[in-house]
Amino acid sequence: MSRSTASSSDSRSDPLIQTSRRAWLGVLAVGLATFSVVTTEMLPVGLLVPITGDLHVSVGEGGLMLFVPAILAALFAPLVVVGAKGADRRWLLCGLLAMLTAANLASALAPSMPWLLGARMLVGICIGGIWAIAGGLAGRIVPPQSVGTATAIIFGGVAVASVLGVPLGAFIGDLAGWRAAFGAMAAGCAAVLLLVALALPPLPAPRSLSARQLAAQLANPAVRLGLAITLFLVAGHFMAYTFVRPLLQSHAGFGQPWIGPLLFAYGAAGVAGNFVAGEAAARQPGRVLLTITLALLLTLALLAALGHLRFASGGLLVAWGLAYGGVSVSLQAWMMRAAPGAVEAATALFVAMFNLGIAAGSLLGVPSVDALGLRANLWLAAACMLLPAGALWWWRQQPARAREAGSAFR
């Protein structure tokens, strides 16, 4: 036997290498789970016009497809962390993915908006549960020196889904209809469920977290500020982004064949923004978040002023994606720095507030668009960015708190 053949044989039989490979396959499976659930959450944004037209409801009413699951996700994120005390995390994740698969199938078959909103309620439970559980799994799957990379992959699923979920849904919807988009998502969720069941090791419940311990994090001023920033930043974004498709078609005048490519350009810019911001946010999340917030404020204001021009609206959409792509990874970096000894608790609160922001933004956007129109709604969304921008600027001017929290918040 040659040396290379022997080396290959040893590699295949080395239990440590096999364990390492399975661990990273497990990390990938969890990352795909977060990608699946957030993509399902975002799917109606790119399908808003065909869904509302087929089910004979207004575009504003269609915004409830984001509000309903988001509000339930905000409720269930902490409830799952506190309530699922003795459940093996692998099987809990599998159960939630099975529910997500069923919810997508129910959405694909929905004969009316009430039916569709009922399916979206199940999606909300899955969002809160999967996202909250996934955040604490990296340290239980890979060795300590690899936790940072594993966490980036898991939360990368959230970031990538946040920016690619909409164009993916729009692309499938344009090819085969909005029902086919939900059907394809159901098939994808079933495949991820199988991968999670096979790739993850048994994950017995960790030390239980009580409601009192969860609430205790609210005494941390950096956690409180991070939650407030999350709420207003995400609400402002989704107040506008929920209606991005009618914005491109009605306000900018793009025809249907342009929508998929434009949203994919937004998504590609968002993926780039995720990686660019992620590296910088690991060192200085406060500075990165302030930059992102100001960029979103400027982009939304320019869209309101110039969005009727096709060239301007296309370029600004890409800039919007680039800026928003860094939001989730930067906010997560803030929360991890704010509560290094209670990451699971801080993550549960962060997930709850993030989804509350989605619910608030989509809910506020409904009467805003119906009463004032798409352009005025953009101005209001831009105004929402003033609050987190001001809070971050104020925080950076507080030397005592900066010393207490550490230079990472500068």
Image (cartoon, rainbow, N blue to C red):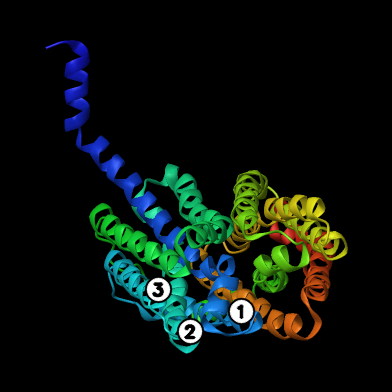
Seen as rendered, the residue at the extreme bottom is 114
Q: Which element type, helix, strand or loop, lies under badge 1?
A: loop
Q: Which residue type carries mark 3?
A: Ala
Residue beneath the point at 71% across and 59% down: 254
- Find residue 201 and report its horizontal and vertical position in percent: 25, 55
Say which residue label 2 marks. Answer: 117
Asked if residue 136 can be seen in this view, the reply is: no
The residue closer to the viewer here, 16 or 49, is 49
Kindly identify which residue carries mark 1.
Answer: 63
Q: Please state if 147 lies on the left or on the right of 239 as rendered.
A: left
**Which x, y percent locates residue 368?**
76, 82
Q: CA distance from mark 1 to mark 2?
A: 11 Å
Residue occupying the far top of the picture: 2
Q: Closer to the camera: disc 1 or disc 3? A: 3
| Residue at left offset 63%, top offset 63% | 338
Q: Residue 288 vs residue 105: left or right?
A: right
Q: CA distance from mark 1 to mark 3?
A: 17 Å
The one of 392 and 230 positioned closer to us in this rendering: 230
Q: Position of residue 185 (x, y in %)?
A: 40, 63
Q: Is residue 27 left or right of residue 368?
A: left
* Count of numbered tags: 3
Above or below, 215 against 273 in this view is below
Q: Amino acid at mark 2?
A: Leu
Give whichever of discs 1 and 2 has the lower sequence position. 1
* Residue that badge 3 annotates: 108
